[in-house]
Image (spheres, grey):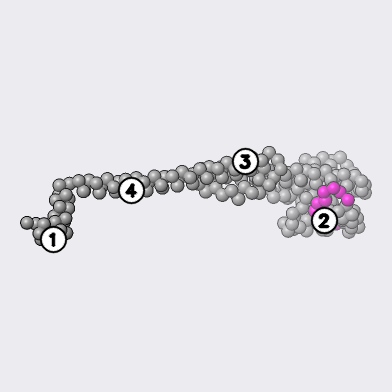
Amino acid sequence: MTERPGCVLVADDDMVNRLLLARGLERDGHRVRAVANGLEALEALQDGLFDCVLLDVLMPGMDGYQVLECIRSQPKFRHIPVIMISALDDIESVVRCIEMGADDYLPKPFDAVILRARINAGLARKRLHDLEQEYLENVGHVVEAAADVETGRFESRQLDGVAGRDDALGQLARVFQRMAAEVRSREDRLKQEVRQLRIEIDDARAARQVAEITQTEYFQDLQAKASKLRLGPDSQE
């Protein structure tokens, strides 16, 4: 069994070869889907995510060269490692496959040990590509978070996925979350202080307006007349 099994697509019109390849790969722990021709291979690629493709060169209808060309022409497939398998034992076929984008070439009858090594190498390339893509996506999340901080839309949980990484990018995300939380806390305290200050200013403005009114001669005269009225008729003599 391999250390990190993957999902492998096998395309070969020879039933015996398909069975041998599928059983050997399954013994190594891989998940395998086997198809009999090129069209079925392309349909299978549309249906699922594969980590490696074993592709026979000579097949009726759509041959391996045509399938390889289709795989390399589509962005969502072009990163999948393709290992060509053929009974053709000539250098021209090997060169053509490599020039068209094949990752490797294995002649029939194939050696199980060599096949295992080629598969493992292809899976390693696929995992490296996937890790690179994941890293770039996580970098994009951090960049988006920085933009959201500036617009006030940042939520700490949007970086939880990146913060779970155990590398430098994960550490950066965790530091970013802490800094953003501190900034938000300071902003909340500042807003509270501003609200309190506004209340104090409003109270002071109201008190000043009251004082300005009570200090006028008109108000003081009214106040004196009100006092006399409260004292009764005798006070007006």
Which residue: 33% across, 48% down? 203
Classify residue 167 by image quadrant. Answer: top right
Segment colored magenta = 1-14
Element on which disc 1 rests: loop
Residue 88 or residue 157, whichever sits in front: 157
Earlier sequence position, callout 4 versus callout 3: 3
Earlier sequence position, callout 3 versus callout 1: 3
Q: CA distance from mark 3 to mark 1?
A: 77 Å
Residue furthest top as drawn: 168
Marks 1 & 4, CB-CB < 8 Å contact? no
Q: Amino acid at mark 2?
A: Arg
Could you say where residue 202 lies in the image, as x and y percent from the top left?
33, 48
Which residue: 46% across, 43% down? 190
Earlier sequence position, callout 1 versus callout 4: 4
Earlier sequence position, callout 1 versus callout 2: 2
Q: CA distance from mark 4 to mark 3?
A: 42 Å
Relative side of 51 to 205, left or right: right
Residue 121 or residue 55, whichever sits in front: 121
Comparing marks 2 and 3, which lies closer to the viewer?
A: 3
Q: Amino acid at mark 3?
A: Val
- The residue carrying mark 1 is 232
Q: CA distance from mark 1 to mark 2?
A: 107 Å
Comparing marks 4 and 2, which lies closer to the viewer?
A: 4
